[in-house]
Image: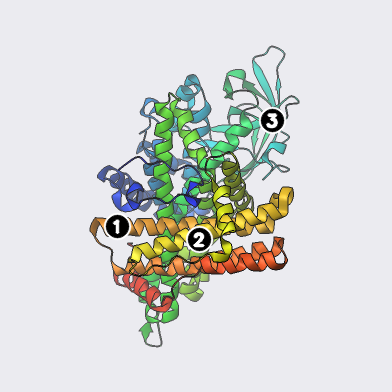
Amino acid sequence: MENVIMKSGEFLVKDLDPKDIFIPEEFNEEQRMIAQTCQDFLDAEVLPNLDKIDAGDRVLMKSILQKAGELGMLGIAVPEEFNGFGQDFVTQMLVAETTGAGYSFSVAYQCHCGIGTMPIMYYGNHEQREKYVSRLATGELIGAYCLTEPGAGSDANSGKTIATLSEDGKHYILNGQKMWITNGGFADTQVVFAKIDNDRILSAFIVESNWPGVVIGPDEHKMGIKGSSTTQIYYNDVKVPVENMIGDRGQGFRIALSILHMGRMKLGANVIGAAKQAITDSVRYANERKQFNTQISNFGAIKHKLGQMAIKTFAHESAIYRVSKDVDGMINKYKSEGCDQGLAAIDGISHYAVEDAILKVWGSEMLDYVADEAVQIHGGMGYSAEMNVDRGYRDSRINRIFEGTNEINRLLVVEATNKFAKKGEYNLFQMAEEIHKNLDSITDGAKSGETYFEEKRRYIGNFKKAIMLTLQSTTQALGKNFMSEQEVVNNLANMIMELYEAESMALRIEKLDGLNGTKQVYRDMLDVFVYDTASLIAKNANDAIYSSIEGEEAKRLVKGIKTLTCVAGVNVMQARRNIANVLIEENEYKF
């Protein structure tokens, strides 16, 4: 595969050839074996123990994580030098997807492997990596990440935890409080963020949980992910050796933000596994449950739900592995330029600020939709704690809050897009100006004799024009107040997110068609998704325009948006039924 690397947000102005993306159908044998190992582990160690795990058994959860370490599952992203497997980012995301079907275990697992380990791997020195990462990779140590405080949530840098250098210069004396700490009840190591003396910016430290002055609170009672240990942690004159500072003084805020980029992207993969499990549970129940002398899977309303659940999951899976290949390409680029392995990895991930915010928001909301419909398909049994869809429904809700709320991440989608464009990474505003100049004569670009995929590419190209036009018009109209008008920013974020998911799905299906021909059911998915995307982009564009622009200019822009979001009608009822029928026949999600 040619190594074509897209910059973050560049998809708005540049079209990609399907041959240049990675799709899940291209996983190699080793990747499939790793995923199967993870699935076998869930089947053997996690799923039979879900009730015990949800009862809050800290010892059990830690022991399961340690068993995962014995299999090498905790070291997928860790280089071999430090007892890991050194797998590429695509493989890491496949593992995140597979383990996403593990309910509370997936939260504990992702916390340990990601934010509990990677700050040390990416920003630590060789000695810190040898001492801690090599043991975190095997499960000898279990990690946690301590950033949030009672008064510092989304505004992470406002934390009050303080580190003061001791008189002999050998330790930092740590005082403060952290909250919502995943794995807090049993973690051996903590990545703790604090301000040194009167510093304005955070620094980061490795703290061992058994040190004097570290006080672990009881587990919080939560709506969902009940088996995930979530605690407050107090630091009372904790002596942290100076050599346990991660990176440089004042680098903690950068470390925190970079790690959140990684966490968002892996959460975006995690939700796919949970969604596929919910769909499988739903179709199996629908095939068993009878009402009015027939299985409920025969009813159109149920087929609509199953079809839409599958469409959303397939679209998001397409987007996840598309960007994963881009991340691997960027990491390899940084390595070839002489960058340290750890920093190359985190900088490669962090580069895709637009995409990781998209994937976190869209993926978490996709799973909420799927989990909600799974409960509805199960009816009264879905509201019973006997069924896993009850657990999945409650567990899903945290994903819209984890790793930066969806409200914050919607702002980030637009803010990062604007930042890259203003830096000259791509000529978004110049292209938007050209579209605006020719707005009165704009057409949908339809040509006779278009092939199926040429038509879809034209639609998606028009969606890009609609987004550029709306972004340019609203930023000019609102000026310096643009980012403060969060409703308008949200409209733009919604447009960008829908476009990325739609284009990713279209590229995947076109590539599949070129490899071995496309089954009609995949075209049904794409037809419905693009048809729905057109309406969503039009609605959000109109809302943004009418909220920031008045008079004839608003009418002119809305007329242009109508042209750019015009797509052919689709028999969505039959298309969703076709998709549902495949699920019903297979009795599980197998797309």
Q: Which of pointers 2 and 1 indicates the residue nearer the eye?
A: 2
Q: Where is residue 539 in the image (x, y as percent from the top left)?
A: 59, 67
| Of pointers 2 and 3, the one earlier in the residue sequence | 3
| Of pointers 2 and 1, the one earlier in the residue sequence | 2
Residue 354 seen in this snapshot:
yes
Q: What residue type is labelled 2?
A: Phe
Position of residue 436 in the picture relative to residue 158 (left or right):
left
* Camera-nearest residue between 95 and 53: 95
Category of crowding for the residue at label 1, using alpha-carbon neighbours closer than 10 angstroms: few (below 14), some (14–19), many (at least 20)? some
| Of pointers 1 and 3, the one earlier in the residue sequence | 3
* Camera-nearest residue between 201 and 299: 201
Category of crowding for the residue at label 2, using alpha-carbon neighbours closer than 10 angstroms: few (below 14), some (14–19), many (at least 20)? many
Whether the residues at callouts 2 and 3 have beta carbons within 8 Å, the answer is no
Which residue is drawn at the image coordinates 47% and 20% (left, top)? 126
Which residue is drawn at the image coordinates 65% and 69% (left, top)? 555
The image quadrant of residue 505 is: bottom left
- Find the distance from the CA under tag 2 to the CA under tag 1: 23 Å
Relative to 383, say whether 217 is above or below. above
Q: Which of pointers 2 and 3 indicates the residue nearer the eye?
A: 2
Q: Residue 201 bears which disc, if any?
A: 3
Quadrant of image for the C terminus: bottom left
Q: Where is residue 391 in the image (x, y as percent from the top left)?
A: 50, 61
Relative to 308, say whether 425 is above or below. above
Which residue in the protein does label 2 denote? 463
Which residue is drawn at the image coordinates 40% and 38% (left, top)? 328
Q: Which amino acid does label 3 sit on?
A: Ile
